[in-house]
Amino acid sequence: MENESTPPPSIIPIFTLFPLLPPELRLRIFNEILLALVNNEHAALNKSTPTTILKIRFSHSHQRYVASTSPPVTLSISSESRAFTLSRYTYLQLGPAASHAPFSTALPPSEIPIHYPTTTLYISLRPLIGSSVHSFLYHLSTSPSRHLIRSIAVDLRIWNRLCEDGFMGVLAGMKALREVIMVVEYNREFKGQLGFLDVPNWRHDLCWLARGAGRSLKEERGRGSWGFKGEVEEAGGEVKVRCVLLTKGGEQA
C-alpha cells in the first residue's frame, strides 16, 4: 500500500528546457501569452478590438490606487519575461505621488501595469463622498498618464456627482481619450472575468443619458481651450460615450 504521507505527483507539466530555447523564440512565446490574455478576455463579447478591463480603486490605508484585476502573468515568470512585458506595458501614474511630482520626474511605480491601446481603465468610486471626489478629480487632472488613457469607465451611480464637480472638463482635457463608459452595477457579487454588455435599445433612459453625456463632452472639447484641438481632429478624435451593464463570468453583476 502506498504511504499516505507521500505527496501526490505533480499534475502540472513543467517544460524544463524552456531556458535553453533561443532568445528570439522565448520572446515570441511571451508575446503570444500577452496576446492570448487580451484576446481571450473579451472573445465572448465579440469585440472587434480586444480590450482588457483594468478595475482600480483608491486604498486609503495605502494612500494609493490599487488594482482588482490581476497583472499579466509574464511579469512574474522570469526577469526576461518581466523586462519584455514592461517594454509593452507601463505603470499607471495616478494618485497623490503622481499629482505632486513634475511631469519629467521618475515616479515610484504604482504597481499597476497597463497597456493603454487595449485597456479600459475602470475606476471603482462608489464609496467616494465629500472631499474624496475632489481628490480623485485632482489626481486624474494632474496625472502624467491622463494623456495616454484611451478608454475610461465610471460607475453610473456617481456619474452626476462627478460631473457636478467638473468631470467633463477633466475628460475634455485628455488628449488620447476615445471612449467614456458609464457602467451600471447592481452590487451583486459574482466570481469571474469582468465584462461590459451594451445596454439594450429598449432601455431608453440609459441610452438618453449616454447621448446627453456625449453631447456635453463634445461641446466641452469643442471650446478649443485645451491647446490640442488640432491634434484631436487630426487623429479623428471623436469620443464615444456609451452605457453598459457590468458582467462577471458571463453573468450580469
Image (cartoon, grey):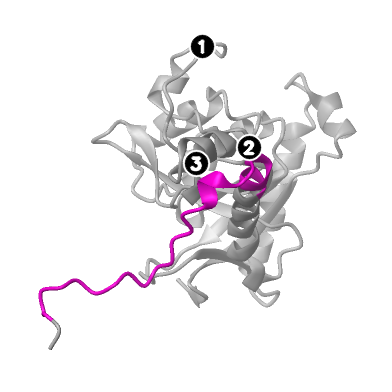
- Residue type at the position of mark 2: Arg
Inspect the magenta stretch and tell me whether residue 7 lies in it: yes
The label on residue 154 is none
Q: Are marks 1 and 2 in contact (CB under 8 Å)?
A: no
Q: Nearer the viewer, residue 58 or 12?
A: 12
- Spatial CA span between label 1 and label 2: 21 Å
- Spatial CA span between label 3 and label 2: 32 Å
Residue depth check, mark 1 versus mark 2: number of the one nearer the observer? 2
Q: Secondary structure at mark 2?
A: loop
- Residue type at the position of mark 3: Leu
Residue 13, visible in the rendered structure: yes
The label on residue 88 is 2
Assign the magenta stretch its main secondary structure: loop
Q: Secondary structure at mark 3?
A: helix
- Spatial CA span between label 1 and label 3: 29 Å
Q: Position of residue 112 (x, y in %)?
A: 46, 38
